Structure formats: structure tokens, C-alpha cells
Image (cartoon, grey):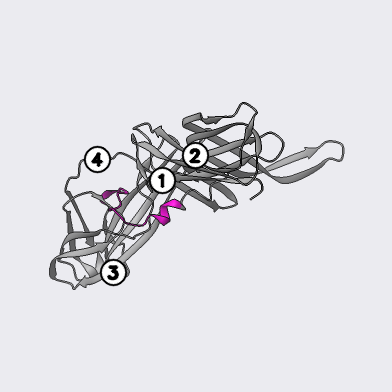
Amino acid sequence: MGKGSIQLILDKPYYIAGEVVTGNCQLVLTENVITKDLTIKWKGMERTKFVIQRTVTRHDPATNTTKTEIVYDKYDQEKTFFKTQLCLANFNGDTAMAGSYSFPFQFQLPDNLPGNFNDHRSSFGNSYRGAIVYKVKSNLDNVYAKDIKDTRYLVIVPRSWTIPQPIKCHNEKSFLFGGSGKLYMDVEILKNVFVPGEVIPIRCIVDNQSKKDVDKLKIKLMKDVTMHAKGQTHTYTEEVNRNIFEGVPKKSKFDKVLNYSLPQQIYPSTQGTIVSCKYHLDVECDVAMAFDLEVHPQIEVIFMPAPGQPVYYYNDMTKGCWK
């Protein structure tokens, strides 16, 4: 603890872009401290970092030999949404007496902020990092010893401008040889905006006029991530979750509502300038020894917890970000 400690206490577990962040800075001094001031810093940013390897062949004229080596190119990019420092208490180099203090604070968030995001992955020897981070840091300037400080990460909910609307998708395919005939699929969803953990009723209409069985119906949540860094772009799509449902025998029809459950712990959709995270569903007719029949409705996942709902998962989202 040294000569004291600082604890930043936020009034809410998360804030919507455009809101005013409020809280208290709790300062406890176990002995007198010579100090200049107590400050609070607010910063929001998105950043990316790529390390991409390539093979380079070099010729040494002196020895007339050729050497091949791996070179690592680094690409970094950052965009700052806000960066502000405020003074909570000014001591002008005088003595702050031992004791407990409480300093209220507030900060107006911009209204166009993207939501939190954090990802780090490797692919074929390359490394890709992307993050959207918001943090607040308080610091007591200790003239003759180590500064006393505390840092908190903010969970920011972006304003969603998407108006929920129904989704309808259609696809069909023909089978050749022993599976002759056509397979039709229509998918209907009442809206396109959801929250983590929500159950999505999906009406699935399959007309299997072929001689092949649809072994099962699959609904998968797919995450689409795009990151940019100094002219380089890295994109990937990965499966987050899947539910399996009954199939459709050959020469038969299927018309049911399939209840697909979104995972409780997923990043919300977000759109920054150099980092974006989007989602779509894969609704598939799984047919043996043939390409599956699929539709890919786009959805938006928003983070809007109910009162009292724990948000520990989101509190930890950005703690692993590099400094």
C-alpha cells in the first residue's frame, strides 16, 4: 500500500455512448504526502498491431553465397476518440495530510463511440491484434516517492442506429445423378437485432423434392472481424456457436419454428474506423456427399443488460489489451 491508495468507483457498470460518466475517487493516505495535485485522465481509443512475416533472399557478393531469412514487418495504427486530463485537487506542492478523502468526478462521453473489443490471434506465423479500449486513470503526484494511482476500464455500449426489421432469405439447389430433384429453403426471422443470451425463433421452410435426405438442419452464429493497420487488412470469419435440429427426409416438406439460443458471453457488434465486429447466421441443410444448402441472414448483437444483470464478462474484455 505504501503511503496510501486510490480507488476509482464508477456509479454504473456500463455507460451508453453520449452519457455522462460519474463516480468518486477514494483517496486513503496512511501518512502525510508532499504532492502537487490529484488528476484524473480519460482516454478512449481503437488500435491495431500486425506482425507479418516474409521470406527474403540476400546475395553476398564477397562470398558469392545466397542466404534466405525470415523478416518480420510491423504495422501499428491507432485512433483516439478522446483524451482528457482533469484536476480533482490541487495541493501546489504542499502537504496532503493523512486521512480518507472522496472526490466526485464526471465526464461527458461522445455520442458516436463504438463498443469495446479485444482480439489477438496468430495465423501462419503472423500475429494480429485489435482492440477498442476505454479507461480512466487517477494519479496522485508524490513528489518524493512513487505516485499513488488506480486505473479502471469502462464498458461502453454504442448507440444502435439499426431499426429492427424482419429478415427473409431464400435459396435452392439441384442434385445430379442419384439425387435428382431440387431442394428449397426459406428462412424467416421476425427481427435482426438481438442481445446476448436471447432465443431467436427462426421459421425454417424446407421443400425437399430430391431423392436425398437432409440429415439435419444446422444454425450457426458466425463472427466477422475486420482489422486495418497502415494499409494492411486482416479479416476472418469464425463459428461462435451452433445448434442442431432434425433433418428433412427425401420427397417431404418441413415447416417449423426452430429456437436458436445466442451465447450469453459474446462481444456485441461494433463498428470502428480500423476495427469492426459483425455477425451473421448460417442456416444449413446438411446433405451427405453434397454441398450444403445455406442462407446467411445478417444480424446485430447489442449489449443492453437488464437492471441488476451481472456484466463481469464485459468488464474483463479489455483487461488483456496491450499497453
How many C-alpha atoms fall within 10 Å of the one at disc 1: few (<14), some, or many (≥20)? many
Front residue of 18 and 253: 18
Q: Position of residue 215 (x, y in %)?
A: 26, 72
Q: Mark 3–mark 4 contact, CB under 8 Å?
A: no
Please tell me which residue is depicted at 54% across the width and 33% down the height of the picture: 39
For label 3, the residue is 244
Label located before the other in sequence (4 or 1): 1
For label 2, the residue is 136
> Which region is colored magenta?
297-315
Q: Amino acid at mark 4?
A: Thr
For label 1, the residue is 155
Q: Amino acid at mark 1?
A: Val
Question: What is the C-alpha distance between the residues marked 3 and 4?
Answer: 29 Å
Q: Mark 3–mark 1 contact, CB under 8 Å?
A: no
Q: Position of residue 43 (x, y in %)?
A: 49, 35
The quarter of the image holding the C terminus is top right
Question: What is the C-alpha distance between the residues marked 4 and 2?
Answer: 29 Å
Q: Amino acid at mark 2?
A: Val
Q: Position of residue 192 (x, y in %)?
A: 22, 49
Question: What is the C-alpha distance between the residues marked 2 and 1?
Answer: 11 Å
Say if 4 sits above or below 181 in the image. Answer: above
* SS at circle 4: loop
Label located before the other in sequence (3 or 1): 1
Front residue of 59 and 159: 159
Q: Mark 3–mark 2 contact, CB under 8 Å?
A: no
Q: Amino acid at mark 3?
A: Ile
